[in-house]
Image (cartoon, rainbow, N blue to C red):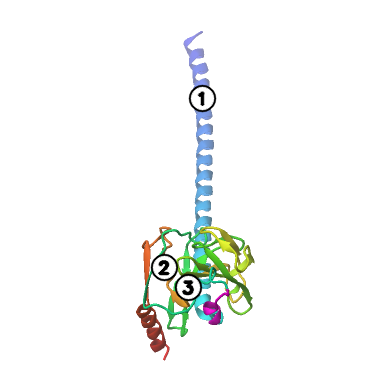
């Protein structure tokens, strides 16, 4: 092969290889740009969903504070049973101080995210006697401690379907806005046993669980007993004192004037 002919053949091959490389590189670059655009679009969509969820939760929390929850009639917290085995409080005398064992516990729902805390709402002139926990309709609600079901009831304008369990450690727990009961009054339940399904019944602005802890009718901040963030109890033994409760009630009363 002559030198000129070799040069022509080599040149043609070089041009073809360069064109092939350029086409491949261009295709890869286009694919890379397309992948980047898709990833960026997915990220923006995810951020938008997160923002929408945050706005929804903020709106629900505001509505809960604004409209509140009609508390059930007081006698449901003090009415007893005929059976001494069921009712541990025969004389209903409330001691000045009581140490309560809370070591053997279960959080009532799996999420444990508090959407509305316990306490007085000065803006609306009312107290929130428990905490609201994030829960979807149909989530399993479990007994916080072992005990006996004292009440299953429905109130249209209040907690909707709700359950009250009186526990062996002296506490009572209230579970509100349920969609279905899984237990009956006077039934013994073990700690962690399913007692209901969460819902959106009664005076509610969205699906959640209203959860209360009480001692002989006295409301106790559930977050003084449970650390919902870390899924543990704050202490092994919670000490109830009437002074603590009376001070809180007095402050709420003064603030409402």
Q: Is residue 213 visible?
A: yes
Residue that badge 3 annotates? 130
Q: CA distance from mark 1 to mark 2?
A: 72 Å
Q: Earlier in the sequence, mark 1 or mark 2?
A: 1
Q: Contact, CB < 8 Å: mark 2 with mark 3? A: no
Residue 37 spot, x, y in % from top left:
52, 48
- Which residue appears farthest toward the front when viewing the image? 84
- Closer to the camera in the image, 17 or 145: 145
Q: Residue furthest top?
A: 1
Residue 222, position as x, y percentages in the image: 44, 69
The quarter holding residue 140 reads bottom right
Q: Is residue 226 above or below residue 158?
A: above
Magenta region, residue range = 74-82
User: Which residue is tagged 2?
Assistant: 223
| Residue located at (55% from left, 58% from top) | 193
Give me the C-alpha separation between circle 1 and circle 3: 75 Å
Residue annotated with mark 1? 17
Q: Earlier in the sequence, mark 2 or mark 3?
A: 3
């Amino acid at each position: 092969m002559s030198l000129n002919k070799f040069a022509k053949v080599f040149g043609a091959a070089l041009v073809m290889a360069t064109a092939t490389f350029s086409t491949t590189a261009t295709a890869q670059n286009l694919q890379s740009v397309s992948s980047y655009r898709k990833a960026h679009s997915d990220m923006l969509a995810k951020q938008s969903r997160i923002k929408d969820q945050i706005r929804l939760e903020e709106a629900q929390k505001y509505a809960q504070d604004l409209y509140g929850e009609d508390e059930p009639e007081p006698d449901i917290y003090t009415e007893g049973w005929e059976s001494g085995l069921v009712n541990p409080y025969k004389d209903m005398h409330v001691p000045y101080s009581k140490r309560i064992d809370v070591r053997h516990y279960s959080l009532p729902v799996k999420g444990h995210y508090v959407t509305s805390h316990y306490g007085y709402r000065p803006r609306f002139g009312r107290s929130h006697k428990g905490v609201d926990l994030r829960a979807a309709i149909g989530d399993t609600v479990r007994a916080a401690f072992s005990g006996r079901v004292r009440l299953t009831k429905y109130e249209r304008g209040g907690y909707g379907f709700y359950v009250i369990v009186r526990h062996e450690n002296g506490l009572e727990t209230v579970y509100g806005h349920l969609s279905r009961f899984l237990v009956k009054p006077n039934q013994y339940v073990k700690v962690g046993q399913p007692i209901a399904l969460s819902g959106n019944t009664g005076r509610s602005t969205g699906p959640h669980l209203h959860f209360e802890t009480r001692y002989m009718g006295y409301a106790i901040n559930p977050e003084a007993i449970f650390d919902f963030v870390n899924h543990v109890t704050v202490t092994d033994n919670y000490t109830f004192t009437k002074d603590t409760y009376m001070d809180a009630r007095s402050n709420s009363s003064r603030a409402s004037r």
